[in-house]
Every structure is written in C-alpha cells, then in structure tokens.
Image (cartoon, rainbow, N blue to C red):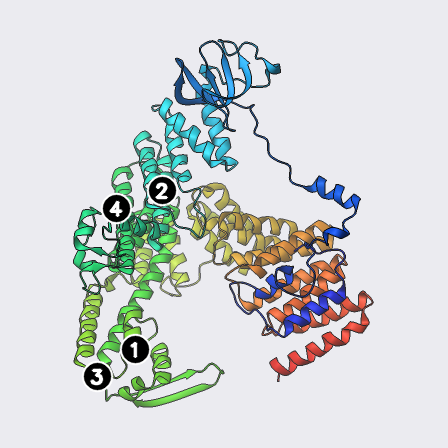
Amino acid sequence: MIFNKFLTFSCVISLLFLFASCGGDEDDTGSKANDDISGEGDSGVASPAEKPDVNEISEADEDLIAEEEEEKVVPNPNGVYLPTGEEKNGQPVYENQEGFTMWFDGAVWKITDKTGGGKVISLGKASINDDWQNGGKARFYPDKEYAKDATFRLAVAFQGSQDNKNAIRLFEQFAMDFPDDKLVAEVYLSLGDLAISEVGPDDQPSYEQISNARKNYAMVRSKTEDIGLISDATFNEGGLLERVAENPEGVVNFYYKFDGNKDEVLQKNEFAAGDFNTTKPFAEYDLNKDGTLDYGELFEVASYETYTQIEKLYRDYQQNFSAKEGARLSEATEKIGFACEELGRPSEMLKMYYQNIEKFGNDPSNAGVDSLLQKYAKKYSEYDILYGNTLRLLKLLGSPTSMVSFSYVNRGGIEESHEGTLEEIVRDRKKLLPFLNTEFPGIDNDVMTELVKSRTAVFTSDTHKAKFLGYLKRFEGYLANFPSDIAPAKVFSKLLQDASASGKKPLELRMRFILDKIGSNAAGGTYNPQRSDFPAASPGVLVWMAEKMIAQNSIEDAVSAMERLIQNYGDAGGEFLFDANYLLGQAKEKNKDFQGAAFHYESALSNSSWHEKANDARMRMGNSLYEAAKSTKQDELYKKAETAFQEVRNGEGASIDLKAESSYMMGECRKELKDWGAAGFYYLETTLSFPSAQKWVPKSFEQAIRCYEQAGLVDQVSGIEKQYADWQRNYLE
C-alpha cells in the first residue's frame, strides 16, 4: 500500500472509526475493510488519487499534467523482417513485429504499412541488402542462412516478453518452413502452451482453443524422441485437461452448436448428430430421464469425457514411452489414478498406486514414488472410512427403533449429549446433523444430503425406502471390491521386511518414511537418520530425514540433506523442492542467518506458490526479512518484509490469526521506519478487520496508542482507548 505523505493522523482515525461501525472482515478469502481503506469506497476521505477542480489548476500544474500524459505509442518500422508465407510480384513478403511489411513492387523493395500499397516508409534496391532510401532506417531481413535461427530466437523472445500474437506467428512460420528441423518439437510445445495464453485465470478455454493446444502437443510427440519434450507436452496437455474437467464451460458451449431448435437442451438426435464419441450412451447422462440433456447434464458429459481423455493420455504415454530412460512413469500413474477416482473407480486407483510403489520403490531417483506413497496412504484411509461409515449408517437405518446416544461440542463450545431412538434423532434436524458428523464422519455426501432432506420419510415412504436400499446395495458392492488386502500399514511393513532382508536400502528407507508418516510402529524401534544413508534416499525421504535432524538440533546434517536434494533432484524433485527450501529456511533461522532464510523461503514459493504451507512460508520470509532489517539497519528490507506480510494479509487460505499477525507485523515494519501514520493505520486496521484474534488485537491497540503519542497527537488517543475498552467488553467478558 502506498501512503500519501499528506495523509494526517486525524484522517486515519476518522476513517477507522467509520469502519468500526461496519464490523470486521473475518473472512479468509479477502478483506472488505482493506478495500475501503485504500480509498476506493465512499469513505468520506479524499483519495490521494482524486484530482482537484479544473478551475484550481495553475499554469505550472497544467505543464506538469501535460508532461505526465501518456505518450502515444508510434509503431516502429525497424526490426527484423521475417517471411509471412505470401508472395508479391514473384518475391516473398516479409513482416516485422509491428505489422510493417516489406515487399517487391516489380522494380524495388518497399517497406509500407500495407502489403501492395499504403504509406511508404523506405525504399530499397532489388538486392534488398543494398542501401535504402530515407537514411536506411529500416533494417533488413536475415540472410537465408540465418533465417531459421533468427525466426526461432525471435519467436522465443516474443513468447518470453508475452507478445503472444507475434510469438504464435513466428512459431507457425518456423513449423511451415522447417518441418523436419530438430527444433520443431520445441516449436510445437510452445504453440501448445500459447494456444490458451490469452485465456484469463477466471475464464475457461473454448473448445477450439483446447483442440488447437492438444493438436500441437500431439505434434511434439510425433516430431521428437526426446523424452523430456515428450513428457512436457504430455503433462502440459494433462494439466489443461484437468482444468477443463473441473469446469468444462467451453466444451458445453461447443455442444450447444448442435442445438438445432435453440431450446438450450439437446435432444437425443441432436446429441447423436454431434458425434461426441462419448464413452457412455445418451441414457446414462439423461439424469432426470426427460429425453433431453440440459446444461447441468451436459456439464456432467463434458467433465466425465474429459477425465476419460486424461486417463487415455497418460495410459498411452506409459505404453509408448515406458522403455525410455527418464520417462515420468510414476507421475503418469498418479494422474491415471486421479482420473480413475474421478470416474468412480477408486479401488482401481489404489491397486495401481501400490503396484507402482512395489515396482519402482527401490529407485531413489523416481521422485514420483514418494508422492504416490503419501497419496496412497491418504486415499486408502479416506475410502476405508467413506465405505465403512456409509455402509454402517445405511444398515442402521433399517432399524428405526434402535436406541442411539452421542455427544458433541456445540458452536458455543459447550458439550451436549443426546439419547433416543434412531427415528427420534432423524426426525430432529438439530440433532441429526451433529449425530451424523459425530458418529459417521466422512460418509458419502449424496447419502447424507438425501437423508437430511427426507428425514423420517426414509422409514415411511416406499419410494425413499427403495432409494436407500439401492444405496445399501451399492455400498456393499463398493466395500466388497475395496482392496483390504493392501492396507498401508500391512503392506508397507511387509515391504520393509523384504527390503531389509534383500539389502534394498532405498526401498527400506522409503518404507520407514511412510510408516512413520502414517503413525505406524511396524518399523520397530526408532530410526536416527545418518549421512551415510543420503545416497540411497529419495527426495521425500531426504525431506523426512531433514525434519528429524532439525528436531534433534542437527542443523548441519539437515542442511546437507536438503542441499543434496536440490543438487541431485532439482529437475525432478517436484513438490519436495518446496520442502527442501522451506527446511533450509528453518535451518538458517536457527543459525540467525535471516537473509539466507528469507532467500530460501522465497525460493520455496517460486517453485510451489500453491503449497499447503505457502502462507506459512510467506510469513516466515517476512519475519526473516524483518529480523535482517533490524540487524543490518537496511530500510529496504523492512519494505520487502511488509510486502511479504501483505501477501498473507490479502491472500487466500490463511487463518484469521495468521492474517491478524501479518497485519500487525506490517505495522511493526512501518514503526521501525518511523512512519507513524502508516504504522498506526495498520495497527488499527488489525483491530477492525480481525477482532476475534485475541493474541494480536490487544497488542495492536497498544502499539497504535504509542504511534499517536510519538506523533504528538495525544488528543486522539482517548478515541482509541475507548475502542479498546469496547473490544474488551465484547470479546473478553
């Protein structure tokens, strides 16, 4: 946030008192109060961006405004000219990045703003590379021997500078002119990425954009034997399909092209005419059995079929490239499993994950196994609970007179106990929800929703009885097919024994790692990580070792483990690169190397800004920069710390307490800079936005008072003290 040097304390306190009447912003997704404070709302305080009345502008001001007016961008006729693929008078037509064309009029070469005419910028002789008129201001196209390299390099430069239009133009030109060149696979990879480059983060790609991207990714696989490029194309395509599957709006809009009578539903004949190559028949998508598919049903069609495409994409990858060294087979298995789960086949996913772990577990360089281990354990537990608890509930519903009892903690923090027949509990909505959440956690959402909606009708209505009998049969089948023989603790302890007996150290370490993570003592005794085990350790195992070493205060050993991870698995470490840098940051903090800690937290975020610990890393980075600033007296570090705290304060996913702490620390940064106005602003904002954060609100009130006293505005302190007293009555009494 930029603070106007002329913003007075009285303006700040007036503004904040205004907000006090509106309540706080205790919402993890954003800050209404912060938006208003920025001056965008009707706050009653003039925003620094507001302009004075035109009649009050002096001649000097007019000159200043004139200087600050945005300069008009004049197209540049210079630059590298490359062929467009067209011809004029028997010669190729060339174009630069600004849209100027160079063409032969039959006698001389011209550079104009329009092929075959337009405004003439410069003239050249027939040889092109001779002198040009008008001072030779126009640069020439590359000689033929350099045209290929120039086209590729310039296209890459355009892509890097986000001039996507020109990047696409030149990459397409390269693919057309040099179809067999060794670089053409990289060209198609870029074209695949660029196909959806103009789609905003909140928008969805169209069917045409999706198809164009997939066509280019497929060309990569057909044009090269380089497994790196093949993998990039496949996983980039898979990432695009995941985005589409989650929200297939663009595909659904394409389906509506076949809506002949424009009634916003597709009849069976219209759906058949579309030739969508679906894996399930029309009737299975017609959920309400009305003979048509509406938007919601078409959404399901598009989502289901996209997940089917994801499964096929990665199965083809495994089938075609499994023999290639460096193929990302475990990652592909994880993606296939993800698709299977979304398609309603979680048991198949689990069996596939286990087979991959068993097959590749002794290869420490296969980082995908570490991810699969954790996902396997997590998913197995989720479905074990889901199937078991749902089936237990469905069986219980067959005995409405059964006596049940349960206890839970209500919203007020008071424990309540209830007892009665099942029918009595189900009848009372206020008891039913706590009963289900307490006694049957993790049950199927459809079953839960239907029970809450129908309540005692499940015991009295034949229709509802039939539906829940159908649920019962379905979940009996699910549980019967669930792979209970490969429960994580059971199979991982067996693999540990086998690995120890056969000297498979990487597999042994992996099994110790995952058994420890799931809280099993099957490994027997306590394992103390040793440097000698580092060569056999995979990325996930190295992270686990480092965590244990830090807990034991073996900081140097932990640092060595993480440095090895970054050095050896920098390209394949995936999410573990975040963990490595995060732990290095912690180690640097313990050694009081705060600038080094901040560097590693920033590196962690650059690799995986989406990580579940991302906000914690941002907070730690801010604290490290703050401590570094205190020791080095570098004001710039305080400003960087403030930025890190602000990302937590205004971002998503952070808890209320963490947001309150970040807001408070923004005040601390400004206080150290002796910017009392900004500091007081942040402290008071903390009290208004996060009033339930009892650790940080009192501190914020106290610091705000000190800031006002430092500024000599003692007369305004009483207002803050009144706010503080009101808060104490509301939140502490």
Looking at the picture, how far across and down is residue 252, in whole percent? Answer: 30, 52
Label 2: element kind:
helix
**Residue annotated with mark 4:** 312
Q: What residue did someone put label 3 on? A: 459
Residue that carries the numbered disc 2 in the rendered image: 209
Residue at 71 percent of width and 59 percent of height: 670
Q: N-terminal of the two: label 4 or label 2?
A: 2
Image side of residue 402 versus residue 710, left or right: left
Q: Earlier in the sequence, mark 3 or mark 1?
A: 1
N-terminal-most mark, 2 or 3: 2
- Helix, strand or loop for disc 1: helix
In space, the residues marked 1 and 2 are separated at their CA atoms by 41 Å
Q: From mark 3 to mark 1, how far is it between C-alphas?
A: 13 Å
- Give the label, 2 or 3, closer to the camera: 2
Contact, CB < 8 Å: mark 3 with mark 1?
no
Residue 345, percent from left and from top: 24, 58
Position of the C terminus by quadrant = bottom right
Secondary element type, mark 4 = helix
The type of residue carrying mark 4 is Lys
Q: Residues within 10 Å of mark 3 (few under 14, many from 20)?
A: some
Q: State the image coordinates of residue 360 (x, y, percent, origin top left).
A: 32, 47
Viewer-nearest residue: 247 or 233 = 247
Q: Are marks 1 and 2 in contact (CB under 8 Å)?
A: no
Q: What residue sits 40% from the left and 42% below the top?
A: 196
Callout 3 secondary element: helix
Q: Is residue 328 visible?
A: no
In primary-sequence order, the first of circles 1 and 2 is: 2
Local crowd at mark 4 within 10 Å, few (<14), some, or many (≥20)? some
Q: Amino acid at mark 2?
A: Gln
Q: CA distance from mark 2 to mark 3?
A: 51 Å
Q: Quadrant of the N terminus?
A: bottom right
